[in-house]
Image: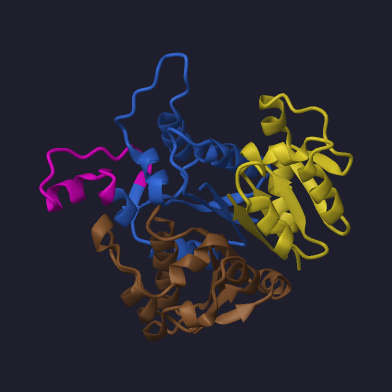
C-alpha cells in the first residue's frame, strides 16, 4: 500500500517522532511504500541539523535524516511551523535575512498543500504526536 | 474527491493545536475536498463567543472561524456530550455548528478517507 | 469499513482513550502505543473500561512500548502487537485516528 505519515510531536521531549520512525521502517520492511512524511507543528524541529545529543543517547534528528536519505523518502517540513521555530533552508535564510540556514539533509521545506496532496495520493495516512 | 475529517480536541490559546487544526482545514478546503470539521472534548471551547486574547498576546480566532464559510467549509460540528459536559449551548458559540452524537461522529469517522485529530 | 484508533497517552493522564471508546464502532480496533499502553494493565479501572468496550472491538498494545515500561500483566482481552502488526492493522482498516 501507499502510506503517508504525519508527525506533530516535539522530538526532543516526546516519543512520537521515534514511534513514527519505527513505524516507517516497519512499513518499508513489510513491502509498502511511503509517499511522504510530513512534519508539522513542533515536529519540524526534527529538521534541525544543529542538535547535539550526549554520546550515550540516540540522535533522533540524525537518525531521521539518515533514514530519509537511505530510502530516498519525500520528507516535508511545514514552512509555517518551521519559520516560527527557527528551522530554515538556504532560500528562507536569504529571504528573511537570517545569519544561517540549518535544515538537515533529506528534508524539504514546503506548505500544508503538500500534506493535503499526500492525503489525496495515499491509501493510508497515519499521524503521530501531540 | 476525498473526505477529510478534522477533530479539534484542544482548548484555544493554551497551545497552538487549535490554530494548527484550523490551518489544515482551510488548506484542505483550498484543494476542494469534502471537509468535516468537528469540535469535541476541550475543542468546543474554541467556539465560545467573546474571546479577548489581547492580554495574553494571542490572536482572536473569530475571523478565521468566520472564514470557514468563505472557504466552503459547511460541515462544522460539535459533539453534543462535550458541549453538555461544559454547560455550553449553541447560544454560547460564535459561529453556528451542528450538534452530533458520539454514534454519529463514529459513523462520520468511519466514512472518511483521512481523519486528523489535533 | 472500519477505523483503527491509535491511543498514545496514558488513560490516567488524559481522556484520549475515553474519547476514542466513545466514538469507536463495532469492528473498529484500538491500538495502544507510547504511554497509551498503561491502559492495558490488568485489573485497573481502565482495563475494566476497555474490557467493557471490547465487545466487538479488538484491543492491541504495542510490544515495544509494553516492554519498555515493564508491563507484563495485561488484561485478558489485550492482544500484543509488533510494529509490523501495527503496519498491518493500518492496512486492514479503512482509516486511522490518533488520539493523544
Q: In this view, does A71 lie to the left or right of C57?
A: left
Q: Is residue A32 above or below residue B11?
A: above
Residue for point 65% across, 48% down? C7
Q: Is residue A122 left or right of residue B18?
A: right
Chain drawn in blue = A
Q: Residue B45: tell me if it is visible.
A: yes
Chain drawn in brown = B
Q: Where is residue B112 in the image (x, y as percent from the top left)?
A: 63, 71
- Number of numbered tags placed on the structure image: 0
Residue B20 lies within the magenta run: no
Q: Residue B2: tell me if it is visible.
A: no
Residue for point 31% across, 55% down? A79
Which image quadrant is residue A60 in? top left
Residue A85 lies within the magenta run: yes
The region drawn magenta spans: A83-107
Q: Where is residue A7 in the image (x, y as percent from the top left)?
A: 49, 48
Residue for point 68% across, 31% down? C64
Nearer to me, B52 or C73: B52
Which image quadrant is residue A65 in? top left
User: Residue furthest toward the front?
Assistant: B87
Q: In this view, does A103 lie above or below C64?
A: below
Q: Where is residue A39 in the image (x, y as percent from the top left)?
A: 43, 49
Residue for point 50% across, 39% down? A17
Colour of chain C in the rendered structure image: yellow
Q: In this view, does B54 lie to the left or right of B82?
A: left
Amino acid at each position: 500500500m501507499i502510506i503517508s505519515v504525519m508527525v506533530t510531536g516535539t522530538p526532543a521531549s516526546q516519543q512520537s517522532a521515534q514511534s513514527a520512525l519505527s513505524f516507517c521502517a516497519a512499513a518499508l520492511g513489510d513491502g509498502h511504500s511511503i509517499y511522504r512524511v510530513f512534519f508539522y507543528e513542533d515536529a519540524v524541529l526534527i529538521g534541525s541539523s544543529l542538535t547535539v545529543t550526549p554520546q550515550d543517547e540516540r540522535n533522533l534528528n540524525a537518525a531521521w535524516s539518515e533514514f530519509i536519505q537511505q530510502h530516498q523518502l519525500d520528507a516535508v517540513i511545514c514552512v509555517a511551523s518551521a519559520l516560527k521555530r527557527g528551522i530554515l533552508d538556504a532560500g528562507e535564510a536569504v529571504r528573511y535575512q537570517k545569519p544561517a540556514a540549518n535544515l538537515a539533509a533529506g528534508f524539504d521545506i514546503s506548505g500544508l498543500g503538500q500534506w493535503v496532496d499526500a492525503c489525496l495520493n495515499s491509501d493510508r495516512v497515519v499521524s503521530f504526536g501531540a | 474527491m476525498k473526505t477529510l475529517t478534522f477533530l479539534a480536541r484542544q482548548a484555544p490559546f493554551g497551545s497552538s493545536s487549535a490554530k494548527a487544526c484550523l490551518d489544515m482545514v482551510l488548506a484542505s478546503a483550498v484543494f476542494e475536498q469534502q471537509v468535516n470539521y468537528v469540535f469535541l472534548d476541550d475543542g468546543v471551547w474554541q467556539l465560545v463567543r467573546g474571546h479577548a486574547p489581547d492580554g495574553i498576546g494571542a490572536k482572536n480566532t473569530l475571523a478565521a472561524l468566520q472564514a470557514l464559510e468563505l472557504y466552503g467549509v459547511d460541515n462544522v460540528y460539535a459533539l453534543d456530550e462535550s458541549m453538555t459536559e461544559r454547560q455550553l449551548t449553541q447560544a454560547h458559540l460564535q459561529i453556528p455548528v451542528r450538534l452530533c452524537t458520539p454514534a454519529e461522529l463514529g459513523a462520520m469517522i468511519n466514512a472518511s478517507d483521512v481523519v486528523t485529530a489535533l | 469499513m472500519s477505523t483503527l484508533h491509535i491511543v498514545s497517552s496514558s488513560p490516567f493522564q488524559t481522556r484520549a482513550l475515553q474519547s476514542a471508546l466513545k466514538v469507536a464502532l463495532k469492528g473498529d480496533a484500538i491500538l495502544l502505543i507510547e504511554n497509551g499502553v498503561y491502559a492495558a494493565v490488568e485489573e485497573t479501572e481502565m482495563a475494566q473500561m476497555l474490557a467493557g468496550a471490547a465487545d466487538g472491538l479488538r484491543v492491541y498494545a504495542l510490544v515495544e512500548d509494553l516492554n519498555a515500561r515493564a508491563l507484563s500483566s495485561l488484561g485478558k482481552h489485550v492482544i500484543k502487537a509488533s510494529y509490523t502488526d501495527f503496519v498491518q492493522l493500518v492496512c486492514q482498516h479503512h482509516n486511522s485516528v490518533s488520539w493523544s
